[in-house]
Amino acid sequence: MTVTSLDLPELDAKPGGDAQAAVVPLRIGLLLDSPQALHHLYQLVLWARKQPALAITHLIVHAPVQGGTPPWDRMLAAMLRGLMRAEGMVLRRTYRGHLTRHDLARSIPERLDIAAPMPGANGHIQFDVAAVDQVRALGLDLLLGFGPATVDARMAAAARIGTLWMRYGRGGVAPAAGFDECRHAEPATGFAIERIDGTRRVLRAGRVGTRVSYLENQAHLYRKADVHLRALLTGIATTGTLPSPAGAPVPGLARPRARDLLGYAGRLFKRAAIKGTQRALRMRRKFGISILQGSWRNADLRQAVEVTAPRGRFWADPFLWTGPDGRVVCFVEDYRYATGRAHISALEIVGHRAVDLGAVIVEPYHMSFPYLFAYEGALYMCPECSGSGQIRVYRCAEFPLKWELAAVLMENVSAADTVLFPRDGKWWLLTSMDPADVKDHCSELYLFSGPSPLGTDWTPCAANPVRIDPAGGRNAGLIMDGGRIYRLAQRQGFDRYGEGLIVNEVLAVSDEAYREREVRRIDPDFGRRLIGSHHMTSTGTVTVVDHVRREFVF
């Protein structure tokens, strides 16, 4: 047994000074097969330093599994690492540090080296009694591990509360994490946080949108999933117990083969060539809207009539409102290719025509999703303006063209496509957030409640995020019909934003939980050359849907 202690007094400094001195933090041990770890684990350690209620006190390092790795597997791992290095040269700035390795032994106060485990059944690795006793003697509250192979029941019980295991995609952990989903061009890549106690039970799980390149998909998955790992650790530190299993299925594992790497590389080059050609020819995604005179229920969207925005613009994210004079006005995202951003404009719906009334709200950042609601006799709009770092609400001073800022509901948030509605004496706010700060609002849906839609007192739902899935994690409108509430949600595809729509009926909403059921799906099969549809609105007698296709834009 080798135990190393580091003199790192700054690691013991927790925010709060003397007021926090009496706090006994949750003691966590990281169980790894090497002290050299990717950047996301180093970031986890840095985050834990700042938490008064928990501390990563021990790094437990075991030697490679006895029996070694077969030569073929070593070769595949080397090929994957080579692919990672190649893709790392063109990785987006957001993920640029992903491949940086850190010696965690320099950042965690105590290190314990234990004997190599033996391979066991059902994907477990088996530690000898001496290794288990050494870990138990550390007095840890929680053991945390990563990867495709989990520990046996004896090691899992070595910490007071138990053992958590983190899995990223079907690959489990680097170098294979995120590869299989990208190779198959799947729209989502999953993660799971499991409780290990002789069985595998999922405590938290989610899916995030799959990126086009394998390495970016892996980096994106780590950033997104680790936010929820941190939230779970914080909750355990607060309650002192593990939460109940989520009921999600235990994820399967996939090991790439040499031919899989070759096939992936070929498809990646093909995609890059197609995208390069499209850019050179100025073929861009162009949204549009279509009008249907009729209800949204069982609507035959093939009968909808498309209206065209002026040259150099497109209209999307339609929201309908019937004014006091009976005019039906559609508020839209009005995107200008010349500036690369949009403002909010108004269109009067006359039969199957849309009359451009002009801009209604223009800010120095991109705006879209002009969600409308009534409150105390006035009309309000909550547009998407994530570039401001706020959730803002505007009041209509004169319908439909004059609007003024009425309230800022939240500050310093990265939130998109917010909807508000009253129910059971409260106002409810559903919004898509990006706590990982990777400019992706397509998978995590958060719920809040408050006494007023114009206030700043918002209580988060205990189940937040209430959905982690690119199929439904971003709002696409809200329809109130016959006393029922229908949340429209976007469905993302692989490398395709806004591939389709899901209509969900809201069944239950509270400070503890949120439930909805899918009642309809809308695919982009109602118009010529459509590749997506991501928004719908209806007054009950007029329905407007948006859609997207690739077109030459000059």
Image (spheres, rainbow, N blue to C red):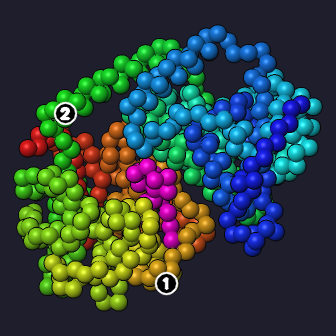
State the residue at coordinates (84%, 49%): 140
Horizontal side of 391 relative to 319 (left or right) equals: right
Total tally of numbered discs in the picture:
2
Can the viewer see residue 403 in this picture?
yes
Callout in the foreground (1, 2) = 2
Q: Which mark sits nearer the N-terminus, 1 or 2?
A: 2
Q: Which residue is the extreme one toward the bottom?
A: 377
Amino acid at pointer 2? Gln
Stretch of the chain drawn in magenta = 430-448
List x then y, in percent, for residue 535. Answer: 29, 57
List x then y, in percent, for residue 468. Answer: 51, 52
Of residues 311 and 290, which is closer to you in this image? 311
Of residues 158 and 115, which is closer to you in this image? 115
26 over 395 or under it: above or below: above
Of residues 76 and 348, which is closer to you in this image? 76
Distance from the alpha carbon under mark 1 to that under mark 2: 49 Å
Amino acid at pointer 1? Pro
Of residues 357 and 50, which is closer to you in this image? 50
Which element type, helix, strand or loop, lies under badge 2?
helix
**Callout 1 crowding tier (Cα within 10 Å): few <14, some 14–19, many ≥20:** some
Residue holding disc 2: 278
Residue holding disc 1: 451
**Rendered image quadrant of residue 64:** top right
Q: Tell me the number on the disc at residue 35.
A: none
Can the viewer see residue 147 in this picture?
no
Q: Quadrant of the C terminus?
A: top left
Horizontal side of 224 relative to 497 (left or right) equals: right
Q: Quick check: is 51 in the magenta stretch?
A: no
80 over 33 or under it: above or below: above
**Rendered image quadrant of residue 175:** top right
List x then y, in percent, for residue 99. Answer: 52, 33
Q: Quick check: is 437 in the magenta stretch?
A: yes
